[in-house]
Image (tube, rainbow, N blue to C red):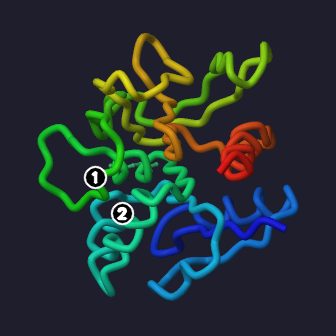
Amino acid sequence: KKRVGVLALQGAFREHRQVLEHLGCDVIEVRKTSDFEGIHGLIIPGGESTTIGKLLMIDEMGEKIKELGTQDLPIFGTCAGMILLSKTIIDSDQYRLNLMDTVVERNAFGRQVASFETDLLVPAMGPNPLRAVFIRAPYLREVAPNVGILAEYEGRIVFARQGNLLASAFHPELTPDLRVHQYFLDMIDEH
Ligand code: GLN
């Protein structure tokens, strides 16, 4: 049985937990460095990236995640998680994990339509579009050639993979479609 950690410092970790349990995983809510022991993958949920970043500095949890990510542990960041994974955050010096060769822009979809839902085409997940929920979402303004683009919305990169690292601007834990979490679990199987 797969043991998947969900970073549970702040944000939408309960919803990820429910989806992963539905898919038959053992879920560990990660709140301190020793909680990383024995996990096969880690999800960094949406929430507030500056807050999660500050909390990651306690107990050197962020350093531990960097180490695990560099050692090939599959890590999936959604929304704030995508921000934290990126090496470059436009106009911000906030704490980050510095793992993905991506340039991210926060709150990129404007104030009027800060939150919205749309049907997203994700070719890697078959012909049926994915219902995607965006909440004060970021997007990837630039990615290095070693980063695979999984989906774009209006020409903006909102879903990408770099080896063992996966990042989505949207919240797959808020819709009943299980394909994104299943994709992450398949990444865990590959490793
Ligand atoms: N706007 C948030 C941030 O910058 C991310 C929003 C989210 O995770 N839903 O951290």
Secondary structure beneath dot 1 equals loop
Nearest to the observer: residue 75 or residue 170: 75
Discs 1, 2 touching: Cβ within 8 Å? yes
Q: Quadrant of residue 13?
A: bottom right
Q: Which mark is residue 17?
A: none
Residue linked to disc 1: 98
Residue to which mark 2 is pinned: 66
Instruction: Give percent across and percent down for residue 140.
Output: 35, 29
Q: In screen coordinates, is 6 left or right of 113?
A: right
Image: 64 above or below 71: below
The amino acid type of the residue labelled 1 equals Asn
The one of 28 and 117 positioned closer to us in this rendering: 28
Q: For the residue labelled by badge 2, is the local secondary structure a helix, a strand or a loop?
A: helix
Answer left or right for 98 relative to 175: left
Query: Which amino acid type is marked by label 2?
Result: Lys
Instruction: Name the residue rendered at 65%, 20% in the picture.
Output: 122
Q: Is residue 179 left or right of residue 114?
A: right
Which of 105 and 41 lies nearest the eye of the viewer?
41
**Front one among 169 and 25:** 25
Q: Ligand 1 near label 1 (Cβ, under 8 Å)?
A: no
The image position of residue 42, as x and y in percent, is 57, 62
Q: Looking at the figure, which quarter contains the N terminus?
A: bottom right
Counting residues from the start of the chain, the first of labels 1 and 2 encountered is 2
Pinpoint residue 130: horizontal percent, then vertical percent.
Answer: 71, 26
Q: Where is residue 39 shown, x and y percent of the image?
A: 63, 72
Q: Residue at x 35, y 43 (%)?
A: 100
Say which residue appears at 54% left-offset and 38% top-offset.
170
Mark 1 neighbour class, 10 Å CA radius: few under 14, some 14 to 19, many 20 or more: some
Q: Residue at x 45, y 84 (%)?
A: 33
Neighbourhood count class around disc 2 (C-alpha, 10 Å): few under 14, some 14–19, many 20 upward? some
